[in-house]
Image (spheres, rainbow, N blue to C red):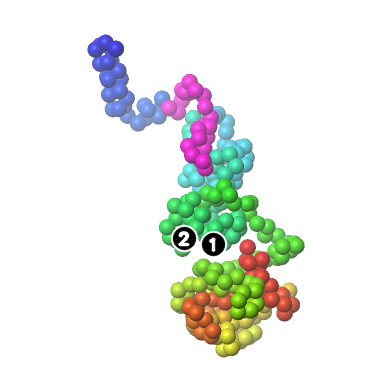
Amino acid sequence: MSRKAICAVLALVLLLGVMPARTLAWITEDSFTPCTRVRGVVTDSQVELHRVVRGETLWTIARNHGVDVGTLMAMNNLTGREVLLEGQLLEVPYRHSRVHKVRAGETLWEIARMYDVSVSDLASANDIRKPELLKIGCVLHIPSSASGPLPRGNQSSRGWITAPLKWPLVGTITSRFGWRRSGFHHGVDIAASLGSPIRAAASGTVVFTGYKPVYGRTVIIRHANGKRTLYGHAQKIKVKNGQKISRGQVIATVGNSGRSTGPHLHFEVHQNDKPQNPLNYLR
């Protein structure tokens, strides 16, 4: 390339660099279209860039990509009131990748169980270092090994119920329902810090508060349709017998009372006086 040509190229680059933003917007937002005419650009295994064409809306783009409009808006920091510009790039889930928009009251643990994936894999896929600070509206990428969201409707052969129970505590499950060396375990143990709040899994009436052998300080709540939930090893009990309780209300704090090897909640679900696997009701 001759010296004159090099100078011309440098002058053009300098001119573009000092152009006002309004002029640049005109160049990129008017009828100019890159010669490749590519509408989708793959950026990684989870996100694709969609180039808006004339006449498209958030709703048509969401429908064509099989994604919820709210998720699309959250991924691109949109409110739904913006006017999409021809040529504008939007992030959408790539191919069959799954995304989940966090709703009020959801925790990383609940979402992980909803998609049948481990909490650690979900946190790693989204670079989450503090799961307890999960924000409403945040869009999470579900690892490709995950299945679809587990059913939340009417009762089926796997034991799902019409109104799933709320997780009473955010923590690590250290012992599951079923047989173990010491005998049959009638619930699940959820480890957490001493004094962490324990919440009612559903609305109901308190039918027992006090100390039970093995269980330590215990709360039992009667719910509709013949269900009862039990909360054991508490540090402090915050409710009284006969008290009406709402779903999510704090009823006790995590303790180490009774036969326990560390601070945790022992949680049981009984249907018509028969112990059930709580995980079938909490998903």
Q: CA distance from mark 1 to mark 2?
A: 8 Å
Splitting the image into 4 quarters, where does residue 22 fall? top left
Q: Is residue 82 left or right of residue 156?
A: left
Spot occupied by residue 207 in the image (x, y as percentages of width and height)? 64, 84
Residue positioned 74% across, 62% down in the render: 156
Residue 11 picture quarter: top left
Looking at the rendered structure, the secondary structure element under dot 2 is helix
Which quarter of the rendering shows the N terminus?
A: top left
| In-image side of 227 versus 234 (left or right) | right
Q: Which numbered dot is residue 261?
A: none
Q: Which mark is residue 131?
A: 2
Q: Position of residue 71 (x, y in %)?
A: 55, 47
In the rendered image, residue 264, in percent from the top left (x then y), is placed at 51, 76
The picture quadrant where one finds residue 246 is: bottom right
Residue found 51% across the figure and 41% down from its top:
45
Range covered by the magenta-colored residues? 28-52
Q: Does dot 1 land on a helix, a strand or a loop?
A: helix
Q: Are marks 1 and 2 in contact (CB under 8 Å)?
A: yes
Query: Amino acid type of disc 2?
Result: Pro
Amino acid tagged 1? Trp
Position of 3 relative to 178 (above/below): above
At 40% from the left edge and 29% from the top edge, which residue is drawn? 25
* Residue 109 tag number: 1
For the stretch drawn in magenta, what is the main secondary structure? loop
